[in-house]
Amino acid sequence: MKALKRLCKVLLRRATSWRARAAPSGARDARREAVEGRLDGLARDNTSVLCDASGRKYVAIFESELRVMAGIAAEWAARGLETVQEIYGLLSQGGRAVILLVTAPGPNAAHRRLFCQQDLEFFRRTSEAIGRRLGLQVIGSEHLHLVDLPHESGFDEQQVRDFTARNNFSCWVQIITTVHDGRVSRPSGRSPRKGVGQKDLLRIAVHTFLYTDPQRGQKVDIPLRVMPGMSPMRLSALAGGILDPADIGQSYCDFPMDRIVYNAFDFDAHYPQQDTRIPETLALVEQFQELPEEVQNNIQICADAGRDSVVVALPLPGSGRVSIAYSRVPTHAIESISLGDGENRDTEAELSALFVGQRGVALRQIYETLVAKRRPATHGVCRLESGDAASGTRQEQGHAEPGEA
């Protein structure tokens, strides 16, 4: 039986080899090209989609969360007591940590001059709500040091090892805040936000560490990449009533950025080819939110490399589009306005005369002006004629009745 199986394998190999030799050369070449094409496609599909292979270059955080973190630290430092905050966010496949929400210390948190501990019941409640409703997980914590210690103590490191081991975390962000100028008031019985004005707030230094292997204590001192504006997760938590504003320190969002000292990531130095970026000062996101929802869902943006302008194309009711070109240079003057094929060129000329060269004109204003100009001008006339006709009929009926009487 074994000899028969070996004979079948030999015959099968010979038959396969004979078919390959017998096939026309053109067919073999086509087959080879098809296989190479599939392999090339697989190679393209398997390429990395990350901007870099390592997440150790920076930790990303929204400006609102940095303000809250520093504001809470400043007010507890003014009382001469340590404090703690939890950090929630997401981790990329490349190990990039993105901080999307920061929670305040709970009402029963322990604050001492050389020690602090979060309110565990508060932590359980908020982390469960954030995880279920926002899809975020705790990825780190903040800890205020009143002494001149801009890094974790041995006790802090042990806490990180224990917590991450218990929850099987492979990455952790630890932020240590300190008073930048070293001036700390003595402990007092005042509650935070009472009797402490903006002018009295301390400058807060933020020191960020990324644990790449928490159980072994492997970490790197890492800069922050601060993204402007309010975190969308903070807005969602407030709009959906997921958490109380006090839970996420909403009253601290106004803490001045010039009172926060941190190691800022030099984005332009690491990623010099940024011609395709949309200037943050153009504030397109805020402008898009003012437009109708059906327009927001179909906006197109062109910011190709080599262009000196950013082009925004908006859909128009019914059909057609309007393209607005903004200068990349602040204050982003409007360079041109063009309508699609089939649109009235007189309308295009009128819009250009109104807005080209202007600065600070909202997209909503351009859109509403164009919609008004495209609206048929006969609607008002029709209503007037209809009203006159009805009035005339009533008058005729009114004159007829006395005659009949």
Image: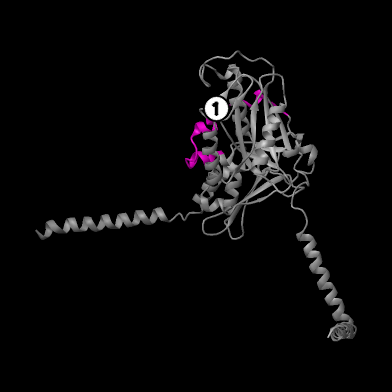
Residue 220 sits above or below residue 23 on the image: above
Report the magenta residues as a range: 234-262
Q: Position of residue 295 (x, y in %)?
A: 54, 52
Q: Which of 143 and 366 is in front in this view?
A: 143
Residue at x 71%, y 19% (from the top left corner) = 148
Q: Spot the residue most to the top.
A: 186
Q: Dividing the picture into quarters, in which one does residue 131 lie?
A: top right
**Colour scheme:** one colour
Q: Is residue 254 magenta?
A: yes
Q: At numbered mark 1, what does the secondary structure look like: helix, strand or loop?
A: loop
Q: Position of residue 358 (x, y in %)?
A: 62, 39
Residue at x 40%, y 53% (from the top left corner) = 380
Count the marks: how many?
A: 1
Residue at x 76%, y 38% (from the top left corner) = 216
Judged left or right of residue 27, residue 274 is left
Name the quadrant of the C terminus: bottom left
Judged left or right of residue 343, residue 211 is right
Q: Which of 372 and 48 is in front in this view?
A: 48
Q: Which of 196 and 155 is in front in this view?
A: 155
Name the quadrant of the N terminus: bottom right
Q: Position of residue 280 (x, y in %)?
A: 66, 39
Q: Spot the residue most to the left.
A: 405
Amino acid type of the residue that numbered disc 1 sits on in the rendered structure: Ala
* Residue 358 in view: no
Q: Position of residue 136 (x, y in %)?
A: 59, 44
Q: Does the magenta stretch include residue 73?
A: no
Residue carrying label 1:
109
Q: Dividing the picture into quarters, in which one does residue 115 lie?
A: top right
* Residue 154 in view: yes
Residue at x 67%, y 36% (from the top left corner) = 162
Mark 1 surroundings: few (<14), some (14-19) or many (≥20) residues within 10 A = some
